[in-house]
Amino acid sequence: MWWTRRWGTVLGTGEDRAIDAGLRERAATALEGAYEFTESHADEALRLRLGVLMGVRPLEDWQAHLETLEQEPGQLSAFEPAFEAWPAELAGVGQALGSLDDLRGLFAPLVGRVVSGLAEAQQGDGSWGRDPELPPTHRRFATGMLGGYLAKTRSVRPETLHAAGDFLAEGWSPDHVADGDWPAIAAHAHFFANTRHEASDEILQWCGRELERGFRARRFEARQVARVLLYCDAIALPGTQLTRVELLEALLGEQGRDGGFAILEMGGPARRAAPTFDAMLALVRLCSR
């Protein structure tokens, strides 16, 4: 069948009994539509990332593109609209690390320079974000996200991660991730799923429960839940009963007739290209685990 021939290596061999052939075929069909949507509406940079994800462009092409954005060693300008919680001076670095993480490319030479730059920029309390007026929630977000990425690299120093973990754990409260605060859940889960810390188990339990609660209450789309799991490189978090098959079914149900995701996003198809890429990445990872 066409979906096996074209997308079989992307979605896995089908040996995983948790995902049957019918569900895998639906995922392949969804991936086909999402690919065509993103190709039609994404900017050049996102199309390049899409090509790497789908195996039609080499990872080196994306690495080379990121190097054109490097203003100083280890410091990059943002290449897409920055998430609100990112401190301005860290948005480009966060986006670069995130894009390389998505493409399994955190071994790139550029990453070594970024790691060195972040070690120098880390504050005395272990956090990142130099603006004294920065809201505490934004500082925690940046620290969790950057620390999670750094933990996946080959060159981070243990003391850098220890300091970041102590910063996040010292001021920890379940209130940080309660009431559907997706950025806080994502940042804490990202860090503590990828590092060893005495607070990891408790914090991940809370993140898992609140992530599922948000999903059940329809505050979080399946795409957002899957994105957190991608950060954690996991198919589930402690404290949750949400299964991979249930999440995949929900994700497939979020796709629009035009092949794109985030159908309620304002601003037209171009604004939906990045969320659709995220959904494609989730489909690939959920089916190939």
Image (spheres, rainbow, N blue to C red):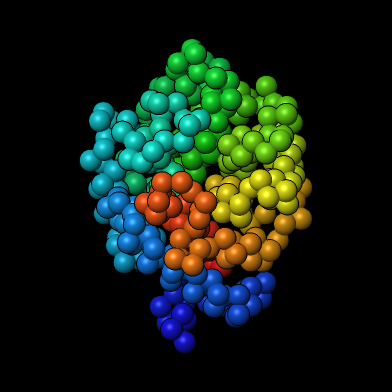
Left or right of 170 on screen, residue 64: left
Which corner quadrant of the image does residue 78 belong to? top left
Q: Can residue 85 be seen in this view?
A: yes
The correct choice, above or below, for 166 with respect to 220 in the image is: above
x and y, in percent, of residue 193 in the image:
62, 43
x and y, in percent, of residue 283 in the image:
53, 63
The count of marks equals 0
x and y, in percent, of residue 84 in the image:
48, 32
Which corner quadrant of the image does residue 71 belong to? top left
The correct choice, above or below, for 180 with respect to 121 in the image is: below
Along the line of sight, which residue is nearer the eye, 253 or 152?
Answer: 253
The correct choice, above or below, for 68 with respect to 8 in the image is: above
Q: Is residue 229 visible?
A: no
Residue at the far left in the pictured view: 68
Quarter of the figure with the C terminus? bottom right
Along the line of sight, which residue is nearer the eye, 159 or 53?
Answer: 53
- Identified at 33% across, 62% down, the residue is 39
- Identified at 49% across, 40% down, the residue is 149
Along the line of sight, which residue is nearer the eye, 125 or 68?
Answer: 68
- Identified at 54% across, 26% down, the residue is 138
Residue at the far top in the pictured view: 132
- Identified at 34% across, 57% down, the residue is 41
Left or right of 183 on screen, residue 261: left
x and y, in percent, of residue 264 in the image:
52, 51
Along the line of sight, which residue is nearer the eye, 201 or 31?
Answer: 31
